[in-house]
Image (cartoon, rainbow, N blue to C red):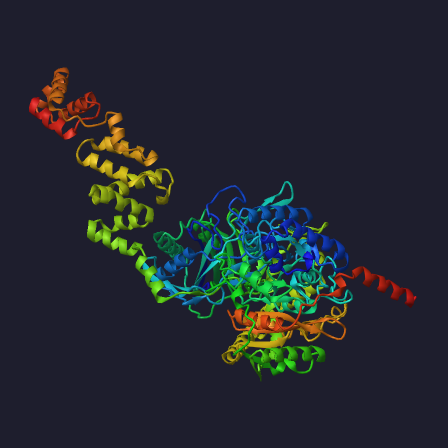
Amino acid sequence: MAKQYETVIGLEVHVELATKTKIFCSCSTEFGKAPNTHTCPVCTGMPGSLPVLNKQVVEYAMAIGLATNCEISKICKFDRKNYFYPDNPQNYQISQLYLPIARNGYVEIEAGGRKKKVRIHEMHMEEDAGKLIHDEWDDTSLVDYNRSGVPLVEIVSEPDMRSVDEVIAYLEKLRMIIQYLGASDCKLQEGSMRADVNLSVREAGTEEFGTRTEMKNLNSFKAIARAIEGERERQIELIEEGKAVVQETRRWDDNKESSHAMRSKEDAQDYRYFPEPDLVPIVISDEWIGQIRARQPELQTEKLERYKKEFDIPEYDAKIITGSKHMADIFEAASAICGKPKKVSNWLMVETLRLLKDQGMEPEEISFSPENLAKLVDLTESRAINSSVAKEVFEKIFAQDIDPEIYVEEHGLKTVNDEGALEEVIRKVIADNPKAAEDYHSGKEKALGALVGQTMKAMKGKADPGLVNRKLREMI
Amino acid sequence: MDITGLTAVELGKKIKAKEISAVDAVKASLDQIERVEKDVHSFVTIDWEGALKRAEEVQKRIDDGSLTGPLAGVPAAVKDNICTKDMLTTCSSRILENYKPTFTAEAVRNLEKAGAVIIGKTNMDEFAMGSTTETSYFGVTRNPWNLKHVPGGSSGGSCAAVAAQECPYALGSDTGGSIRQPSAFCGVVGIKPTYGTVSRYGLIAYGSSLDQIGPIAKDVTDCAAILTAIASHDPKDSTSIERKGYDFTSALINDAAGMRIGIPKDYFTEGLDAEVKEKILAAVRVLEERGAAVEEFDLSLVQYAIPAYYVIASAEASSNLSRFDGVKYGYRTEDYEGLHNMYKKTRSEGFGAEVKRRIMLGSFVLSSGYYDAYYLKALRTKALIKQAFDRAFDKYDVIIAPASPTTALKLGHSLSDPMKMYLGDIYTVSANLAGLPGISVPVGTDSKGLPIGMQIIGNCFEEKKIIRAAYTLEQTRTYERPKLVKDLAEMKRKEAENNGKAI
C-alpha cells in the first residue's frame, strides 16, 4: 500500500499597512501614482537622511498583535537587514529581528468543519522596497521608489497548517481581522497582502519535520492553493524516488503552474543583521497597550453574535454580511438610518449578492452608500414604490449609487394611490375586456389575473398590485 | 585691519558695529585662501562667487536688523561630509566626487539662521575614516604649523583652515576623535558635544551611534557661541535629544573654584609622549591654582576602548556605506556587465583602501557566526565603558586626558601602519563610546614647535563644565598661531635654499 503523507505548512504573511504616510518619512503611501513622485531623501536613501518612525505604524502593529492574541513587546527595536539590490535604495532594509513588536499569538480557524488554532510565532514591522521595471527592449532597468518605505508587518506563523483549506482559512481569518482593524485593505492582487509558503511533507504519523522549501510570488488564493498542491506532489515524488528534498527558496509561476528554485540554503544570503543605530528603541507601556485595546473595534466574531441577538439576523446571513467589513459597515449604517435591519439585510443577501455574482465582484467593491440603500428601504416599506420598481431602482443604486428618491421622482415611478384615477382605469379595463369579466363571473378565477395585468399595464406599473386586485373584485 | 587674525566672535562684533562688512569678511577669508590654500589644501570645494553673494544677502539682513546674533556675517567652512544643498559634498571620496545634495544639514541650516556665510567644504579623511586627512581622494591637507606634518583627522581640513586663518571657524564631525585630535594637532579648539546635541540630519554617516557634529575655532569663546548656534532638538533625527538649554556661552567663566578634576592614571603611562605629558600636567596645575581639586584615579577598561570602537564603527560603516553603489548618484564605473559587476567595479574604484578595509572589517564582525563574538561583545564593552565613566563622574566634574599620544606626525608616517594609526585614537574614542562631550584646547607646543592639545571630558549634557574649565585655562595664556601662515613665502624660500644646499 502506498505511503500516506502529511503536509506541514507555515506562512509568512506580509501586509501593507493603511497609513497615510510612509514608515520613516512623511511621503504619501498612495498607490498607482507616477513613478518617483512620492519620494524624498529618506525613502530614496540619500546620504545624510535619517528615518523617523511613524507612530501609526506601531499602533496598527499593536492592534494586529492584540487581535491575534500576541504578547506585545514592552521594548522593541529595529534592525538593519543588509543586502544589495537596486529596489532597496540604502542597500539595507529596516526591519526587526532581535526584538519584534509581537510574539506568541494565535488565531482560530475553521476548516473542513473542524476548529483549530494556528499559532503565530512573531510579527514584526519593516519597510517595503521600491519597484524595479525591466525594459527588455532597451535592456535597462528602472526603479520606482514610490513604494519604498511603505510600512509592512510580517506575520510569521508556526508550521501548524496541514492542508490548502487550513491555509486559506488562516489567510482569510488574518485578512478579516486586519480589515476589521482598518489596518490594511489586504488585497492580494494589488500586493497589499502577500504570502510566502513554507512547506514540507512527512509520512503520516511521524513527528519529525521533513526538509522544507519556501515558495514566493503567490498573489491569489488560487495561486496559493495550486502552489501548495504542486509542491506537495513534487516533494512526495522526490521522496518516493529516494531523493532528498533540498532546502531552498522556490518561485511559483502561476501561468506554468509550477515552481523553480531561486536559491538554495547554501547560497542563502548573510543579511548581517544588527540594531538600527538611527532609531531609538520603542518603549511600549501597559498604558499604551491599554489605549490600543480600548480603541480596538468590534471584530467579526463579536459582530456576528451581536447581529444575531440584536437584529435577529439568521446565522447564515450574519456570517455573510460580517464576512466583509465593508458590507457590515454598509449594513450597520443603512440600518441605523432606516431602522429596518432585516429589510437592509434582505437587500444585501438577495439583490446585492446576485449582482456581485453576476458581475464577478467582491463585496469590498460595493460602491453604493448606505444612505441610498436606506432610502430605498423606506420607499418600499411606505409602499411608495412597488417591489418590481424597487428592484429596478436598486440596480441603479448598485451601479451608480443614485439617490432613489430623486430617481423615482424624476422617472415617475411612484405608485399611484389615487383611488379615483385607479377606479377610472379599472372601469375602462373591464369595459374593454367583456370576455374576461364574463369568464370571472362564471367562476374562472384566472381571468382576474389577466385584468390585473391589463390594469397594471395601463397604470404603467405604478399601481399597488394588492390594491388593484381588491378594487377589481369590488368593481367587476 | 587684520581681519583673518580675529576670532569669530571678535569679527562678529566688528560686523555688528559696522566696522567691517560681511562681504569684507568673506573677501578677507578668500584672499587668505588664495595665499595659502595651494600649500595647506584645507578645502575640497571653495564657493568663491556663492560666498560673496551670500555675504551680501546676510549684510542686508544685518542692516535691516533681522540678524543680530554673534556670528552674523562671519564666514565659516563646513566639513565635506555635512550636506550643503547644491554645493558639492564629497566625503573626500571618489564615489561622491560629483554629488550635490538636495538638502542642507540641520546643523548648517542652524548656522545659516545665525547669519553664517558658508565659504566652502573642507577636506577630510575619506568618509571620516582616518586620523591624518591623508586618505582623502583629493589629496592630503598639510599642517599649517609645519607643512611636512599632517593636520590630524579626520576633520583635518576644518582644523587646518582655522589654523591657517582661511576662515574664522569651521564645522567638523567626531566619531572617534575626529574633531579633538586634529584640533590638538593644529593648535585650535574643538568640541565634540554630547551625542544627540547637534542634529545628525545631513551628516553623511560613518558610525551612526558615535557621530557628532561640533565646532572648531580659534578659542573657547568661539566654540561656545558656535555650539549655541548649531545645537538643537531636531525631530528629523530620532537620536536628537531635547535639552533644557542651548546657551553654552553662559559657561564662559574664568574660574575653576570648587571644580573636581579627575586624571585617569591609565592615560598618562607609557605610549604618551613625554613633552605632551609635561605640558598637559602643567595645564592641570594651572587649573589647580585657579581653585580646582585634582585627583588621579583608575578609569579601567582603557585597553578595550580601541577594539570596541573599531568593531562598532566599522560595523555601522559597512552598512552605512552600502548605499554608495553607482545606482542613484555619485561615481559609476564606465564599463560593466550586469548589475553585480557594476556594483563591484564601482565600489572597487570608488572607495579608497582605508574605507575598504573598514567595510571588510565591519562586514566580517556582523557576519553570521561572528556577530556574538565581536559585535555583541563590543556593545557590551561599550556599556561597561559608559559605566566606568558614570562612576568617575560621581566623583569628578571633568576628566582631563591627552587628545593624542603625540603631536602631529609627519606625512606618510601613519598610512604604512594602520594599527598604529588606530592606537593613536586611544584617548578620544571612549568619549564617543560613552556619548560624552569633550573639548580639545591648546596647551603649548613641543620642541619641534608643533601644538599640543589637552582634552577635557565631561559627563553627558555637561558641556558647560568642560567649557568653563577650558575657558579658565585659556585665559591664562595667549593664543598662538602658526607663524607659517604669514611667512609662507619665507618658509618656502628657506626650504628651497635647504634643498639647494643638499644638492
- Is residue A284 found left or right of B290 in the rendered image? left
Residue A303 placement (x, y as % from top left): 27, 53
Is residue B297 visible in the rendered image? The answer is no
- The answer to whether residue A415 of the structure is visible from this angle is yes
| Residue B253, image quadrant | bottom right
x then y, percent, for residue B399: 57, 77
Decide if residue A241 is on the left or right side of residue B7: left
Instruction: Give the residue drawn at x 37%, y 63%.
Output: A106
The N terminus of chain A lies in quadrant: bottom left
User: x%, y% of residue B346?
Assistant: 69, 55
Classify B132 as above or below B78: below
Foreground pick, A393 / B392:
B392
Q: Quadrant of residue A292?
A: bottom left
Indicate the quadrant containing the C terminus of chain A: top left, top right, bottom left or bottom right. Answer: top left
Residue A384 percent across, percent down from the top left:
19, 31
Left or right of residue A168: residue A343: left
Q: Relative to A395, does residue A453 appear above or below in the rendering?
A: above
Numbered label tally = 0
Q: Note whether A74 is above or below B297 in the view shown.
A: above
Q: Which is more toward the observer, B483 or B396?
A: B483
